[in-house]
Amino acid sequence: MDTSDKQKKKQQPQKPRLIDTRWVAIIMPVSFVLSVAMSYLSNEALNSAGTLLSFVVLFFFIALGIVFDMIGIAAASGTEKEFHSMAAHKVRGAREAVWMLRNAEKVSNICNDVVGDICGIISGATGALIVANITAGMNGPMVVVISLLVTGMVSALTIGGKAAGKGVAMAFSSKVLALCGRLLSVLPFSFDAKK
């Protein structure tokens, strides 16, 4: 093999990996810890809570899932172009927004899958607890009706909220990312836009 063949071989671009095994190895334990922590906190809050407070916790986790779904969609559908000039003018949060766009796959995974799925699980568990509180002492078909109504309400609010949020996130992705960038800019560590 002569030197020109070696140079050609070196210049061929490498195919991107289909699965980032390093990221999978990181995100699995992180999601486990987050899930356990959020479940524990919600269980502690709901143990002494009445039905009204349980509904507040339920709506909080549904809203949290919708907001994070919007962030994940904005990161996946946004473009870097306008944030480069903002970063050059040292606009707060612009560098972080560029980082989110360049790491859209990971940001989307964390927001849509990790936080979104955990919120969905906790919403379901909270809904079951609300049903148990409301139907205490009841029996027969009324328990089934209340259970179906609460389950349907949780599903409708979650799916409807995410459907509305996706449209907003795609239409206003730059505004969503600018806001997230500003929030991330107050964290004690920096986001390297080159990565």
Image (cartoon, rainbow, N blue to C red):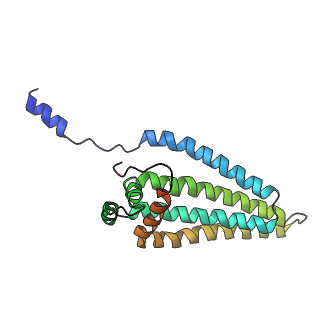
* Residue shown at 41% from the left, 42% from the top: 20
**Image quadrant in which you'd find residue 117:** bottom right
Q: Farthest residue in the top direction?
A: 1
Residue 185 sits above or below residue 15 on the image:
below
Give coordinates of residue 1: x percent, y percent: 11, 26
Q: Farthest residue in the right direction?
A: 137
* Residue shown at 65% from the left, 62% from the top: 61
Give coordinates of residue 164: x percent, y percent: 52, 73
Q: Nearer the viewer, residue 137 or 59?
A: 59
* Residue shown at 45% from the left, 61% from the top: 181
Q: Nearer the viewer, residue 96 or 3?
A: 96
Residue 94 sits above or below residue 32 on the image:
below
Q: Is residue 147 visible?
A: no
Give coordinates of residue 30: x percent, y percent: 56, 44
In the shown orientation, is residue 7 left or right of residue 168? left
Q: Is residue 164 visible?
A: yes
Give coordinates of residue 131: x percent, y percent: 79, 64
Residue 19 sits above or below residue 7 on the image:
below
**Image quadrant in which you'd find residue 77:** bottom left
* Residue shown at 75% from the left, 53% from the top: 43
Q: How many marks?
A: 0
Q: Nearer the viewer, residue 44 or 119?
A: 44
**Image quadrant in which you'd find residue 161:** bottom right
In the shown orientation, is residue 49 left or right of residue 34? right
Q: Farthest residue in the front direction?
A: 90
